[in-house]
Image (cartoon, helix red, strand yellow):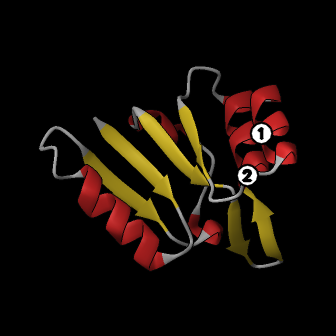
């Protein structure tokens, strides 16, 4: 399984990658910088996208839900999991809407 992890905290991303890759059938690529993320057909290479809900970009914090929604609108068959440590109804409701 090929996974793209979009996570701006390098330590979290590296730890999650190491943990997932203990399963030899899993390969994880990391995007730490949202500026380097281009939403194009290259995302179709991955079986799963893991996206942090709060991403830091050029203009401050970027909502990972917005990134996920943009990707799903462009590529309907993407499988996306949103990562968060927050337990806020707002995030839960908006994630379900996507």
Toward which corner of the image does residue 15 lie, by quadrant?
bottom left
- Which image quadrant: the N terminus? top left
Tell me which residue sits at (46%, 54%) in the image.
Answer: 5
Q: From the viewer's perspective, tell me whether residue 18 is left or right of residue 36.
A: left
Q: Quadrant of residue 69?
A: top right
Q: Which residue is mark 2?
A: 87
Q: Kindly tell me whether residue 30 is visible in this rendering.
A: yes
Q: Residue at x 55, y 39 (%)?
A: 81
Please tell me how crowded label 1 is: few (under 14), some (14-19), or many (20+) other residues with Cα within 10 Å.
few
Which quarter of the picture shows residue 12? bottom left
Disc number lying in front (1 or 2): 2
Q: Residues within 10 Å of mark 2 (few under 14, many from 20)?
A: few
Q: Nearer the viewer, residue 24 or 29?
A: 24
Out of 39 and 65, give the one closest to the viewer: 65
38 above or below 71? below
Q: Is residue 32 left or right of residue 67?
A: left
Q: Is residue 16 left or right of residue 83?
A: left
Residue furthest to the left: 24
Residue 95 vertical placement versus 97 (above, below): below
**Whether residue 25 is situated above or below residue 67 in the rendered picture:** above
Secondary structure found at label 1: helix
Q: Residue at x 76, y 79 (%)?
A: 58
Image coordinates of residue 25 in percent, x first then y, are 16, 37
Q: Residue 95, position in %: x, y? A: 76, 36
Which disc is residue 83 wearing?
A: none
Residue behind mark 1: 92
> In this picture, is 3 found above or below 48?
below
Look at the numbered discs 1 and 2 and tell me whether their residues touch, using CB distance below 8 Å: yes
Q: Position of residue 60 (x, y in %)?
A: 81, 78
- Which residue ends up furthest to the top in the rendered image? 77
Label 1 vs 2, first from the N-terminus: 2
At x 77%, y 39%, the residue is: 92
């Amino acid at each position: 399984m090929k996974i793209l992890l979009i996570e701006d905290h390098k330590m979290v991303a590296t730890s999650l990658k190491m943990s997932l890759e203990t399963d030899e059938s899993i390969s994880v690529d990391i995007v730490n910088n949202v500026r380097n993320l281009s939403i194009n057909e290259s995302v179709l290479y991955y079986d799963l996208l893991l996206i942090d809900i709060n991403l830091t970009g050029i203009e401050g914090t970027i909502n990972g839900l917005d990134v996920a929604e943009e990707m799903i609108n462009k590529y309907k068959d993407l499988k996306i999991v949103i990562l968060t440590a927050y337990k806020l109804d707002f995030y839960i409701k908006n994630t379900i809407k996507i």
